Image (spheres, grey):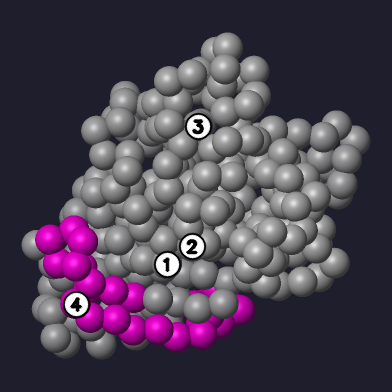
Amino acid sequence: MQTIGVDIGGTTIKLGLVKDGLNIIYRDRRFSPREPQQMAQAVFDMVSTARKRFPNAPVGISCAGSIDGGGFVTAAQLGWFNAPLGEMIETLFGKPIPMDNDAMCALYAEAAYGVLKGCSTGILVTFGTGIGGGIITDNRPLRGHGGLHGEIGHMLTHAGGRACSCGQVGCWEAYAAASVLRQMAGGMPVKEVISRVRAGELADVWHAYLNEVALGLASLMMIFAPEIIAIGGGLSNAGELVIDGIRQTTQATPSFQIFNPFTRIESARFQNDAGILGAAALAEMQPE
């Protein structure tokens, strides 16, 4: 089967034609417009171009931000609050197009083809500019009222702490997003931080950051008792240094040692293409 996955991000729109769930055989990429109508038009144009080569391929869309059941998108990185993107896309295509949050789409990809495949209860956590993710329970994505997905990056880990972009104070994201690691290192790019940690430097900064990551993971373990926690997002591209550091720090917590010693902390299988693959999986689950 061939499906089109579209990944709408704060900087770029990425499109991929996915064959048999995993193989991306065609790609397109454009900068993300800031106006919702222009975004919808850009997605329509990209899909139309792809369908000239792959007629009638079903489409699924991954989008940054929070998406309600009506397709309204709130995304700080795009400057949107309740933008009617779903309705605009439906008008252009002449039919509803399945669309979900980018972290949830990454969760679909991991559950269908990645490290969470066959996992009854698992969590994907993505560390990048913010913290995203989702939960699989009974082999299905966990959703809240009205089909909304939870925002695990905005659970509170520090009462009365730092202000967060979401309007709360003390969010996990404000302490453990990959972008915070840069701040902790005096503005040094994250890649350079990781390189220096590999060289045996910045140990205090690195351990302080890992403790913030583990604080949130400990709370997630206590709530969901997961079989697997998959670590994804841009930070995980650094490989085993990051995964091992997160694993060791989290395994030192009472949440792991006393209550959840069975929880495995693994690297997510899909990184930069997670949104495309998850959107394509969404199209397969809800064909046009």
Q: Earlier in the sequence, mark 3 or mark 4?
A: 4
Task: Tell me: 60 left or right of 213.
Answer: left
Taking depth in this image into account, of 97 and 181 the one nearest to the observer is 181
Secondary structure found at label 4: strand
Residue under pointer 4: 25
Taking depth in this image into account, of 3 and 69 the one nearest to the observer is 3
Residue under pointer 2: 237
Circles 2 and 1, Cβ within 8 Å, touching? The answer is yes
Under mark 3, the amino acid is Gly
Q: Quadrant of residue 219?
A: top right
Taking depth in this image into account, of 184 and 137 the one nearest to the observer is 184
- Residue lying at 33% horizontally and 84% vertically, measured from the top left: 28
Query: 10 Å neighbourhood of mark 3: few (<14), some, or many (≥20)?
Result: few
User: Residue 95: x, y in percent?
Assistant: 27, 64
User: Residue 20: x, y in percent?
Assistant: 12, 61
User: Residue 162: x, y in percent?
Assistant: 87, 46
Disc 4 to disc 1, C-alpha distance = 15 Å
Q: Is residue 251 above or below residue 278?
A: above
Secondary structure found at label 2: helix
Disc 3 to disc 2, C-alpha distance = 30 Å
Taking depth in this image into account, of 235 and 30 the one nearest to the observer is 235
- Please identify the quadrant where the C terminus is shown: bottom left
Residue under pointer 1: 272
Res. 73 visible in picture: no
Under mark 2, the amino acid is Asn
Query: 10 Å neighbourhood of mark 2: few (<14), some, or many (≥20)?
Result: some
Q: Which mark is residue 137?
A: none
Residue under pointer 3: 144
Res. 131 visible in picture: yes
Q: Is residue 178 above or below residue 207?
A: below
